[in-house]
Structure formats: C-alpha cells, structure tokens
Amino acid sequence: MALLFKRMNAIHTVTNDATDNFHSFFPSVPERCLHPILHGVDTDYFSSGSGVDLRADLELEADLPLVGFFGRFMGQKGFRTLVDAIEQLKLTGFGRLPKVLTFGWGGYIREDYQYLEAKGLSEQFIQMPGTDNMPAMIKAVDMVVMPSRWEACGLLAMEVLSAGVPLLSTDCIGLREVVAGSPTRIFSPGSAEGLAAAIKAEIADPSRDRFLDYQPIAVERFHIGRPAAELRALYDELVGQTL
C-alpha cells in the first residue's frame, strides 16, 4: 500500500487526526502529499429543520427525558457504553430513567439489543423506524449521545451542533477535533461512568440554550461550502501541476 500511496500526487484526509493516523501507518509517504481538509455537512438543512413530537407519537410522558443514538450498531460506535451507562443509572437509583431512542440499523443490532435485554433494560430502549428527515429526529430528543471509540471525522456531531441540540460525546480521535470549542459534554471512550455522569448533568441542567447560542458558529464552521472550496483549490493545483 505504501508503494501505491507514494505514487499519488495528493491524499485527502478528513481531519488532522486522520492525517496523523495515516502517517503513523505509512511513514514513508511524504507529508507534503497529505492534505487535511475537514469535512462539512449541509448545515442549513440541519439548522432550519423542525422537530417532531416523538413523546406524543410514542405515547410517552411529556417530561420524560429522551436520549438519541444515531450511530450504526458497530463496536466502533460504542453503543454498549451507552447501555452500560443506563444500567449504572438504574443501579444507583437515579430518578426517572431516560428513554433511549435508537435510529441506526444493520451491523450488530440483534446482538446489541440482546445485550441490553440481558441487563433488563428493554423498557429503556426503543428502536425507531428508518427516517429520511434527520433534522426532525435530532431536534425531537433532549440530547444526542456519541459514545464513539474512534472516528475519521464525526459528521453526526456537525449535524447535531448545527441543529442546536445538546451533544454528549467522547473525545476520541476524529471526533475531538469536531467538538473542540463547543458546549459538548465530554467523556472518555469506553467510560460508562463518564457517560452516566454526563446524562445526569444534562438532565439536571439542560444546556439547549448554550447549544442554540453556539449554533450559528457551527453552521458557519461546518458548512459544506468550505471543504468544497478547499477541494476545488486542491484539484486546480493538481491540474496545474500536470499542464
């Protein structure tokens, strides 16, 4: 692979963490070939969308806290850390447990739901149907949890921050770069204790106002136009090299 990469004029990496990770695996590839350009999303779409009333749709109590998990059911996404965090809240006698709504599909969904069922947590989790209206679902929950163990670039975090919704995330590689400087509540990868504490803190002191204040910054910072322009400039540079 290193021989192949060294024949390329440019390699686009999506975060500085991804750049460092690439270089650690392929140190013989010249650093000048690596071009870190942070990904972006359609921030206007996520900022302008309206939420739906999932409590009414699911016939839940009007003041029951809702936690959203939008990741795939893969080990990398850390879903079982969330399960363990909810278990800790239950075992420590935390008041009314939040309801966790999961929107991901595929991967190890069967095994992961068996895992939470074995812990007696079936009543705390609801697998939602597929949706093509992500802004509505993100804005329908009180907080979004990203318990990722690693990411190349945390696009979901960009979407949530652009929507102005409280985010609880790890500071894993590829994600810490995205949430830096935001009001995100941070916990360590794999730390059920840290996530449980973050959920308790968000329920006790909701931070939506702080995220709404940060929303305009997120919309500008993560707008898809920025990486598009940077990629266009890189392509123009490469074309110029071949003329």
Image (spheres, helix red, strand yellow):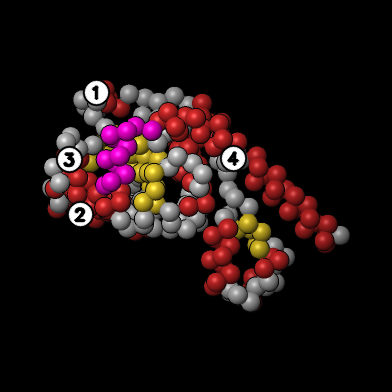
Q: Measuring from the top left, give residue 238's x and y in whole percent.
A: 77, 58
Q: Marks 4 and 2, Cα distance to the nearest angstrom?
A: 38 Å
Instruction: Identify the residue position indicated by label 4 in the image.
Output: 221
Residue 163 lies left or right of residue 231; in this view the side is: left
Query: Three-letter amino acid code at disc 3?
Result: Phe
Instruction: Identify the residue position indicated by label 3 in the image.
Output: 94
Quadrant in the picture for the C terminus: bottom right
Instruction: Identify the residue position indicated by label 1 in the image.
Output: 62
Q: Measuring from the top left, give residue 192's x and y in whole percent.
A: 27, 53
Reading the chain from its start, which is encountered first: label 3 or label 1? Answer: 1
How busy is the neighbourhood of tag 3: few (under 14 within 10 Å), some, or many (20 plus)? few
Asked if marks 3 and 2 touch (Cβ < 8 Å), the reply is no
Q: Marks 4 and 1, Cα distance to the nearest angstrom?
A: 34 Å
- Write down the region rendered in magenta: 196-207
Reading the chain from its start, which is encountered first: label 2 or label 1? Answer: 1
Reading the chain from its start, which is encountered first: label 4 or label 2? Answer: 2
Query: Three-letter amino acid code at disc 4?
Result: Arg
Please tell me which residue is depicted at 57% across the width and 55% down the height of the picture: 15
Residue 198 in sight from this viewpoint: yes
* Secondary structure type for disc 3: loop
Q: Marks 3 and 2, Cα distance to the nearest angstrom?
A: 21 Å
* Secondary structure type for disc 2: helix
How busy is the neighbourhood of tag 2: few (under 14 within 10 Å), some, or many (20 plus)? some
Residue closer to the observer: 64 or 116: 64
* Secondary structure type for disc 1: loop
Per the picture, the main secondary structure of the magenta-coloured stretch is helix
Quadrant in the picture for the N terminus: bottom right
Q: Measuring from the top left, give residue 122's x and y in whole percent.
A: 17, 43
Reading the chain from its start, which is encountered first: label 4 or label 3? Answer: 3
Q: Which mark is residue 115?
A: 2
* Secondary structure type for disc 4: helix
Is 74 included in the stretch rendered in magenta?
A: no
